[in-house]
Amino acid sequence: MNSTMGEPMPGYATTDPTTCTRILEFRLHSDGEVDSRVRKAQAAYRRSTESDVTERAASLIRTARLYRKNAERLAALSVLEIGKPVSQAMAEVELAASIYEYYGTAGPAMLADEPVTAEEGRAIIRTAPIGVVLGVMPWNLPYYQAARFVAPNLLLGNSVLLKHAECCPQQALEIAILLRDAGLPSGRFTNLFLSHRQVADLVADPLVRGVSLTGSERAGVAIGELAGKHVKKAVLELGGSDPFIVLPSADLTLAVDVGTAGRFGNAGQTCTSAKRIIVHEDIWDEFLLSFVDKAASWTTGDPADPRTRLGPMASRSARNALEDQVGDAIGKGATVHLGGVVPDGPGSFYPATVMSDVTAGMRAYREELFGPVAVLYRARSTEHAIEIANDTPYGLGGAVFTTDEHEAAFVADKLDVGMVGINKMIKSAPALPFGGVKNSGIGRELGRFGVDEFSNKKLIHNASHATDRIGSAHT
């Protein structure tokens, strides 16, 4: 075991969600260890500014290969630590690999100097690194969400510090091992097991020049405030309550299939998900019947079984929070069509649940439901569906199902979100920018945007033949 493991300590631990049994504990890094690693990361950044982008890109391609080579072992750790069904865990490993591969292949062209038309002389914009950057990552998609922060910053030449979620320490360690085995120079990537106080100290550290957080709105407010106080760039992805609009011309079989998969996959613990399903009243009865019937097929089971689609939630505390939200809605008059009852037995399992008649006085109307609970809303018209969709503090993603292209374009334009899927759920892909508006956060990841967020867009203006005129103007 390395220095991040040893004496038991509250915080980082592997806990099997199928039994809620604590299996392995990890100690936090000491303040001295953190300081030493930050200085090492800074030195590695200085050395990286002298390296060639093709070398950095090659290490990312090697990382992608290692993810694929070790996919079964990596997926097994997701099953163990967060209860992710193994088939979904394998898909996540492949997505992470594709992100490293994308930046390793397409990335160098993104860093090419960009000519700018200037009145005098020649000007270019150079995309340069900024230094050491910190990522604070969540537990629900441990490999993917780390990859979308890590890969573009390593391509740039930034040094990366990663503070992963407390419940997936072994997956965090595996990420560091894969990058090391891919030949990444020492100090360019560092895994840290930190307390909240240590995270705050790092954001304040002058050597740390940016911070990216994916997590709760509360955590985002705290990190954003600290970053602003210390003049640091921050990217915040804070979740959402995505609308999923189904209009009369929609292919209902497709909408039901996509909607149930989008709501119950990963036990509903995904930021972009069919969380508020808004159905036109003309097709309400037919859609509701089909949706509930399809949802009933999402039965809970052993996440290590390839046939299982709905495993446990990642922790008992997450399940308890969801149970409170659902209980509040039921107590205030919501209708439960399926599920809604915590099962007996060990673990943090929660059944696929479908509710309707959720109103503004209920917590479920305003709050994100981060678990396998679908809420259906009846809309009187397309305009009413858009009104319901936008009546939320969040604005991450959304979807609209209709075979009318003009109607699809109209709804997509009116939704107050960062991403819209037409006849599909928004799914991450390496080349597509990811992010939202309103309380869903600030900034974008993936694609070219993932490179630009923590870069120095440096202007280099060569006076060239304008030297004489500039000189005479100052005489």
Image (cartoon, rainbow, N blue to C red):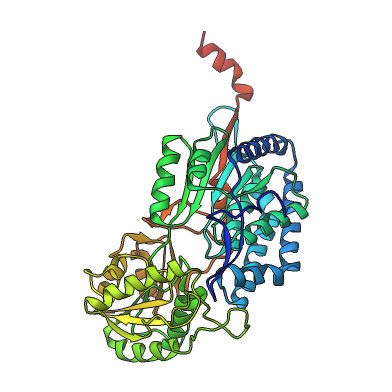
- Nearer to the camera, 159 or 13: 13
Residue at x-position 32% and y-position 70%:
325
Mark yes or no: residue 257 visible.
Answer: yes
Figure quadrant of residue 405 = bottom left
Position above or below: 138 against 273: above
Position above or below: 346 against 456: below
Position above or below: 468 against 213: above
Residue at x-position 62% and y-position 79%:
304
Q: How many marks?
A: 0
- Furthest toward the top, the residue is 475
Judge from the rendering whether residue 68 lies leftward or rightward of residue 151; answer left or right.
right
Quadrant in the picture for the N terminus: bottom right
Position above or below: 278 against 55: below
- Nearer to the camera, 315 or 203: 315
Residue at x-position 65% and y-position 70%:
75
Figure quadrant of residue 359 = bottom left
Judge from the rendering whether residue 400 lies leftward or rightward of residue 55; answer left or right.
left
Where in the figure is residue 465, as x and y percent of width and height?
63, 23
Where in the figure is residue 263, as x and y percent of width and height?
44, 76
Figure quadrant of residue 84 = bottom right
Judge from the rendering whether residue 5 lies leftward or rightward of residue 385; answer left or right.
right
Where in the figure is residue 379, as x and y percent of width and height?
26, 78
Where in the figure is residue 138, as x and y percent of width and height?
52, 59
Mark yes or no: residue 243 visible.
Answer: no
Judge from the rendering whether residue 470 lies leftward or rightward of residue 358; answer left or right.
right
